[in-house]
Amino acid sequence: MNTSIIRRVLGWLLALEGAFMLLPFVVGLLYREDTAWYFLGVGAFSIVLGLALAYKKAASSVFYMREGCIATALGWIELSFFGCLPFYLSGEIPRFTDAMFETVSGFTTTGASILSDVESLSRCMLFWRSFTHWLGGMGVLVFLLAVIQLPGGSHMNLMKAESPGPSVGKLRPKVRQTARILYIIYFVMTVIEVVLLLGGGMELFDALTTSFGTAGTGGFGIKNDSMAGYSPYLQWVVTIFMALFGVNFSFYYLLLLRRVRDAFSMEEVLTYFIIILAAIGILMWDLRGDGLALADTLRNAAFQVSSIITTTGFATTDFNSWPQTSRTVLVILMFIGACAGSTGGGIKVSRIIVMFRTMIKELGSYIHPKSIRKIEMDGKVIEHEVLRGINVFFVTYMLIFSLSVLAVSIDGLDMVTNFTAVAATFNNIGPGLELVGPSGNFSVFSPVSKWVLMFDMLAGRLEVFPMLLLFYPPCWKNLLRHRAAVARGVH
Amino acid sequence: MEHKFTHPKKGLNIVIVGCGKVGLSLVDKLSKENHDITIIDRDAGKVQDITNLFDVNGIVGNGANFSTLQEAGIYDTDILIAVTNSDELNLLCCIVAKRVTDCAVIARVRTPEYSQDAAYLKSKLGLAMIINPDLESALEISRILCLPSAVGVTPFARGLAEMIRFRIPEGNRLDDRRLRELGQELAGAVLICAVERGGEVYIPDGSFRLQAGDVVSFIAPTRGSKQFLRRIGLETHQVRDALIIGGSKTGYYLAKQLLRVGVNVELIESDRQHCEELSTQLPKAVILNGDGTDADLLREAGIEHVGAVVPLTGIDEENIMLTLHTQAVSRAKVVTKINRIMFPEAIDRLNLGSVVYPKALVTDAIVAYVRSRTASKGSSNIETLLHLFDNRVEAIEFIASEGSPVVGRPLRELPTRDHLLVACISHKGSILIPGGDDAIQPGDSVIIVTTHTGLSDLSDILA
């Protein structure tokens, strides 16, 4: 394994995070908050340490799959660790596990919080908390690829490890151009949302943090009641933008290229919107007796559906108290998740489509055992390797899910809480049901369970395998052997 | 001086159809020169492998299919290179692409039937280039057989000058001599431009001391090179007879070329029917039907006395074994063609002598074309590009144009970069090994030898 290139990437990542910490520092200065200085301190330290790590050139700049995965997994842990230091050092989140939980939740765009009183945090801390969503949404490594010319050939393996979806396509021939286009689309859409929110009378600080939460499909609110206190117009803006950020970004790229017909024939995007509309329909029917005006019911249903399927996790109402059918629909949406290639989490609509078609194909093979049929999507045959990847992903996903529920159950909380807590973290949503519902929070869990949930968040964001690789002994043996070989002077 | 050294960093959009040997080596070379590359191949696995290793876009599909080309962004494409293993598909790709947009198209065409019509195809189908690796390697091999003491021979300036590589034998007059001591009596109009010793490559100056075992590259007018080799005591007569093992396309082209220059050719081919075809196509050659890896048959064919042996079976390992066998039983000159395997360190150790890599030949030709397209329009043009010594040295032939900043000034006044040599100037058909007082005139072809890779314009030689 090429450890030196991993070290360099980790160095660049850290320096980049340090540089981004200067933003909350400025915010803190503007609001005259003393805690701002923690960001300057940690930021400067990260920049220095990061550049020191990245300083020495790597012996070889070849990046294989394993280097890509390990660098990504370690990178995200590194980001979370240094990102949590301002919370912890300033004492605003006094326990380390809690600070780490909050930061992991931020970067993985989960939005699950251990804070019972969000409003007590200082402004710069709130800003950083939401900003981690924005960074984590499109991916920090993707940002790195967009700004820094890493040496060597292809860094597709880095991008693959971080980007959600069963197969990652490039928009342009070069990784760097692709990363740039993604970030430009992301940035422009965020700015549009900020402007629309400002137009609806929201304060600039609220508009920024809300947009960060929406764009990354994160879900950290800066109010204790999440989005419930905002006007219907603002809630609609957030609803629509949540849904838009859950769309595969290739869709927007095709629109930019004016290939409108191609864009609107993307099966995944169409299915995604059909699911959203169907879910809203069921909720409207189920909530018909809630005593609210039809417009309010529609707004609540649309907001919650959009928030859950995109794995954002904002809430405008306590859906924990909704009827059972509505709650169940929301839990199912948690698993479906957003489109591949978006900022959302979950299993992803495209995987669901492929798995559904695999099932249909299997049924067909009972009728005509010798028939040969390939599974297609967007008019293209899905290769066997991709299919296998999707199936293995699903199996692994279910396995980790079950084991996590089991691990968390030791705390002795009720089944629905445990189940939805894992579902909400593993799928990067945020709030679940019962104790971890929109009005509750994750502080009910023991520290051990919190670490399990943190693992789930990272595993969910990085699509399971990069994180699992860290726990795969041959991976480390390989590394140690390489170290020993270098020490002996053999390459 | 506003025309400072500026690397033309705006890459071209290049589509490569077919990810075989040549496709892969093109991706390797061109992606290092900062072009935006899209590859198309039917085999998803190959596309996957290449996109994992190189920063290029991969599309699975048939390159002659219009919608596939569209997906590859054919409307913005500058150059399309079709190098699948089917000539027909390559030509069809080019035709389809050419109908849609005004990009330059390059096709690999190997079949002799089509290759004969290369000029016609080029003009009628609007191809920028037709490349034929089999023909190119046959020509390269025949050049070496015409000068058997050389390791490699590359013509420049439309054949007026050539670059020759040879290994200094033990006890040669050049052993332990400084370059400046060679003087007029030995060197004459010859410029030694690169020396490889023990894995290192040097661009030597006057104080450089040669040693036996060095691989020396020199440039000379075509006639001067033989005289030089003769003066230092090396064989310069072309071989009298050659034994070709394997009647592949390269074998056919080589036999044809050798017969043309008056070499007697014996050709061994295992397939009886193919032998019969060859015997009608090459009436002057002796065609033997049999297994070329059979030592008895080879002895019968006269391997011990023949002037040259060229193993051209389709299998690299067989070719290498045949070369080693020939070296053991005969003093014949051997040229080894290696298609596929890339273990340069191991092959270096085997000391095979002259080795020809067809894919390197065609890749160099295409890279030369791409570079001259990259350079700002109208300033200069690349005629020939040659990668030497494991790609560490490039020899490039430019055509100097009017208005280039290097034109009309004595060379000693030009601030050229280090590790760069203006090796040769061809002025109106006469070859000049330039000194400090000579100047480049518009229209001259100028040969540059350098360890800086990626020069695309003559003005790039300035520091």
Image (cartoon, coloured by chain):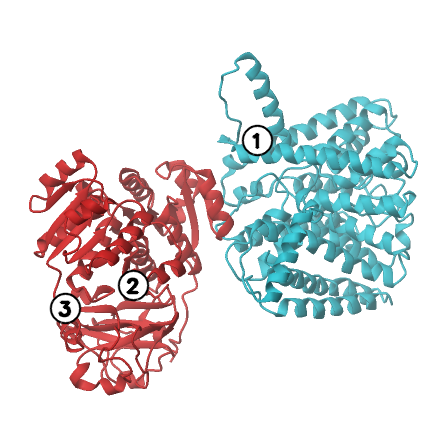
Chain colours: A cyan, B red
From the viewer's perspective, is the residue at label 1 or at label 3 nearer?
3
Identified by mark 2, the residue type is: Leu
Quarter holding the C terminus of chain B is: bottom left
Q: Which label is found at residue A467?
A: none
From the viewer's perspective, is the residue at label 3 or at label 2 nearer?
3
Q: Are marks 1 and 2 in contact (CB under 8 Å)?
A: no
Q: Are marks 1 and 3 in contact (CB under 8 Å)?
A: no
User: Disc 1 on helix, strand or loop?
Assistant: helix
The percent coordinates of residue B224 (x first, y second) are: 14, 74
The quarter of the picture where residue A349 lies is top right
The percent coordinates of residue B416 (x first, y second) are: 35, 80
Q: Which residue is mark 2?
A: B385
The percent coordinates of residue B217 (x first, y second) are: 27, 71
User: Disc 2 on helix, strand or loop?
Assistant: strand
Which residue is nearer to you in this view: B220 or A88? B220
From the viewer's perspective, is the residue at label 1 or at label 2 nearer?
2
Disc 3 versus disc 2: distance between alpha carbons? 26 Å
Name the subunit of mark 1: A
Q: Residues within 10 Å of mark 3 (few under 14, many from 20)?
A: some
Q: Name the residue located 15 percent from the left edge and 62 percent from the top edge.
A: B146
Q: Which label is found at residue A267?
A: 1
Q: Name the residue located 59 percent from the left edge and 17 percent from the top edge.
A: A363
Disc 1 versus disc 3: distance between alpha carbons? 70 Å
Identified by mark 3, the residue type is: Thr
Q: In terms of sequence position, does the residue under pointer 3 or pointer 2 come before the other?
A: 3
Name the subunit of mark 3: B
Q: Which residue is mark 3?
A: B236
The quarter of the picture where residue A433 lies is top right
